[in-house]
Image (cartoon, rainbow, N blue to C red):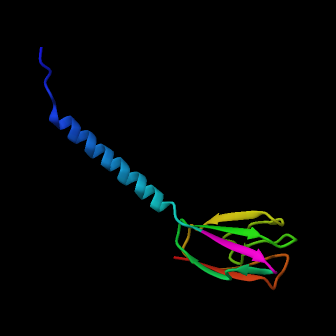
Amino acid sequence: MARKYDSGFGVRMGTTAVAALVLMVGAAAAAGKDYTVTIEGMQFNPQELTVHRGDRILWVNKDLFPHTATAAAKAFDSGSIASDASWSYVASKSGDYAYGCTFHPTMKGKITVQ
């Protein structure tokens, strides 16, 4: 008995696979980029940073004592970041966010979220 071949099945599977691939690539792109702010010498470096919604900012403390990354508008607050520790924040709302270290008021930075 001969089997009947359904040529449409391969086309449907190919289309489904392509659609799944497009969704995976889109999800990866939507995840955003990673940025690092280094805390060292009583400074945030870079002091000003522009990111997009969905991007992740990582603060890394390379000083010998704790610091914070605390937004003036209360958009984010790291709490105490110990020496050799880090803290991250995913930008979710557009705007300009001045921030500083609550332990050391002379330390200031700015995040712009587009």
**Any part of residue 96 in sight:** no
Q: Looking at the image, is 43 positioned above or below residue 25?
A: below
Residue extending farthest to the front is: 2
Task: Please report the residue visible at 78 percent of the width from the left and 63 percent of the height from the top.
Answer: 85
Task: Please report the residue visible at 13 percent of the width from the left and 24 percent of the height from the top.
Answer: 4
| Residue 109 position by quadrant | bottom right
> Majority secondary structure of the magenta segment?
strand
In the displayed structure image, the side of residue 90 where residue 65 appears, left or right? right
Residue 13 image offset from top left, x and y in percent: 27, 39
Q: Looking at the image, is 12 positioned above or below residue 39?
A: above
| Residue stretch in magenta | 35-41
| Residue 54 position by quadrant | bottom right
| Residue 88 position by quadrant | bottom right
Q: Tell me if residue 15 is in the magenta stretch.
A: no
Residue 90 image offset from top left, x and y in percent: 60, 64
Q: As rendered, which of 54 and 41 lies closer to the eye?
A: 41
Which quarter of the rendered picture does the N terminus lie within?
A: top left
Residue 51 image offset from top left, x and y in percent: 55, 74
Q: Tell me if residue 39 is in the magenta stretch.
A: yes
Q: Looking at the image, is 28 positioned above or below residue 111?
A: above
Q: Looking at the image, is 14 positioned above or below residue 61?
A: above
In the displayed structure image, the side of residue 85 where residue 16 appears, left or right? left
In the displayed structure image, the side of residue 9 where residue 52 appears, left or right? right
Residue extending farthest to the top is: 1
In the displayed structure image, the side of residue 82 where residue 36 appears, left or right? left
Q: As rendered, which of 3 and 57 lies closer to the eye?
A: 3
Task: Please report the residue visible at 15 percent of the width from the left and 21 percent of the height from the top.
Answer: 3
Q: As rendered, which of 53 and 41 lies closer to the eye?
A: 41
**Any part of residue 42 in sight:** yes
